């Protein structure tokens, strides 16, 4: 296992460093976010890498010839005798860009439009402006979600100076929206591909080929959380409409426990079938007790580092003096630490797999 860290000029593509000697490195991607990178340069190297203080330097992490992460350096700050370097993935760039022309340069407004198309148009508009081409591509994924209506089209008004990155965040917020993450790899000519991956109805898959367990590959996990505040076996879901015309679905079971009810408000839902399905999913989630928010794992044949993807559902088993818990969790991000006392480790951020509502593909 061998890592190296490379830097490149964002506009010219010139390689600035092929082996930046960073230590204390931690990095990883995120679901519906850019992901992050942190590392340290030692005192004897200060001043030898002036590109680290520039706002147009790209940083890559390579492991055994494969690019594992890529993004933009946003901060290089002296701390004591060290230089602390911070970077973020490709979508972070669009937080520094605005729509100065309106309607994404004439691409909008949008009515009943796939948010995947609008997201691609946001990136295309940003990179069509002089000195704005970061070379980021977006997956050609399509979804059944829609944005904008004939009465209320989706607009981008120049006089509001909208932040393009905020648009990307908004387009993936709704329960039936696509997912995205940032990734990078070498192409056949050994040039880095900078990509925003889209997934619908979701990124990732349910994995039965890998698993995480205490005493096997989990080296640290916080206590399993059990909360009666979130528990319910009756869910009352309300959708669109008002008064007697409001859509409503009640999902209930009896299980020899004290009756607990939860009101789920979904004003955007119009169909009774969709509302009933959402109520059923919510009830199943609230009826299950126990949650693990993160685990730290070591490289192991049960789940080698790099074998999972953003959005994957994985089986997690935690055993300690307080609990013996097992359940399906969705990976929403992770942080790789190449050099620790335990070797290469990864800290995975988790959500309960059944807390996500996946639309129909």
Image: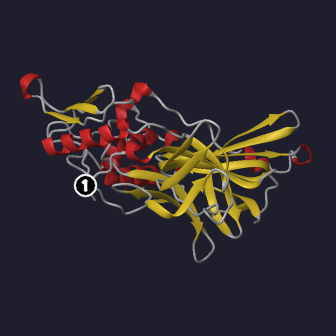
- Residue sitting at the far left: 244
Q: Which residue is mark 1?
A: 144
Depth check, front residue: 5 or 355: 355
Residue 146 in sight here: yes
- Residue sitting at the far bottom: 188
Q: Residue at x 55, y 37 (%)?
A: 224
Residue 130 % position (x, y): 50, 52
Q: Residue at x 71, y 69 (%)?
A: 64
| Residue 38 left/right relative to 154 | right
Q: Residue at x 7, y 24 (%)?
A: 244
User: What colour-coding does the image apply?
Assistant: secondary structure
Residue 281 % position (x, y): 30, 43
| Residue 302 left/right relative to 120 | right
| Residue 19 left/right relative to 103 | right
Residue 295 % position (x, y): 61, 45
Residue 12 in sight here: no
Q: Secondary structure at mark 1?
A: loop
């Amino acid at each position: 296992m061998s890592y190296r860290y490379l830097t490149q000029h964002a506009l010219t593509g010139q390689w600035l460093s092929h082996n930046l000697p960073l230590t204390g490195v931690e990095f990883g991607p995120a679901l519906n976010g850019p992901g992050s990178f942190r590392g340290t340069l030692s005192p004897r190297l200060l001043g030898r890498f002036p590109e680290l203080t520039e706002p147009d330097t790209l940083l890559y992490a390579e492991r055994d010839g494969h690019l594992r992460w890529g993004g933009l350096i946003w901060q290089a700050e002296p701390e004591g005798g060290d230089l602390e370097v911070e970077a973020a993935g490709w979508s972070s760039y669009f937080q520094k860009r605005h729509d100065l022309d309106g309607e994404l340069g004439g691409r909008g407004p949008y009515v009943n439009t796939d948010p995947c198309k609008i997201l691609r148009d946001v990136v295309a508009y940003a990179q069509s402006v002089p000195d704005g081409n970061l070379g980021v591509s977006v997956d050609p994924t399509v979804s059944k979600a829609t944005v904008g209506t004939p009465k209320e089209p989706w607009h981008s008004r120049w006089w509001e100076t909208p932040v393009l990155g905020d648009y990307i965040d908004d387009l993936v917020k709704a329960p039936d929206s696509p997912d995205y993450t940032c990734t990078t790899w070498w192409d056949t000519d050994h040039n880095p591909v900078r990509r925003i991956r889209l997934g619908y109805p979701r990124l990732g898959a349910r994995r039965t080929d890998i698993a995480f367990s205490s005493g096997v590959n989990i080296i640290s996990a916080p206590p399993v959380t059990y909360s009666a505040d979130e528990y319910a076996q009756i869910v009352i879901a309300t959708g669109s409409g008002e008064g007697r015309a409001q859509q409503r679905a009640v999902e209930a079971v009896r299980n020899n426990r004290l009756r607990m009810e939860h009101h789920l408000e979904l004003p955007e839902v119009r169909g009774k079938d969709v509302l009933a399905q959402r109520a059923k999913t919510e009830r199943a989630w609230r009826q299950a007790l126990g949650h693990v928010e993160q685990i730290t794992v070591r490289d192991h044949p049960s789940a080698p580092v790099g074998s999972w993807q953003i959005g994957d559902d994985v089986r997690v088993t935690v055993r300690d003096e307080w609990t013996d818990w097992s359940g399906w969790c969705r990976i929403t991000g992770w942080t790789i630490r190449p050099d620790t006392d335990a070797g290469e480790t990864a800290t995975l951020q988790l959500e309960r797999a059944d807390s996500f509502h996946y639309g129909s593909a």
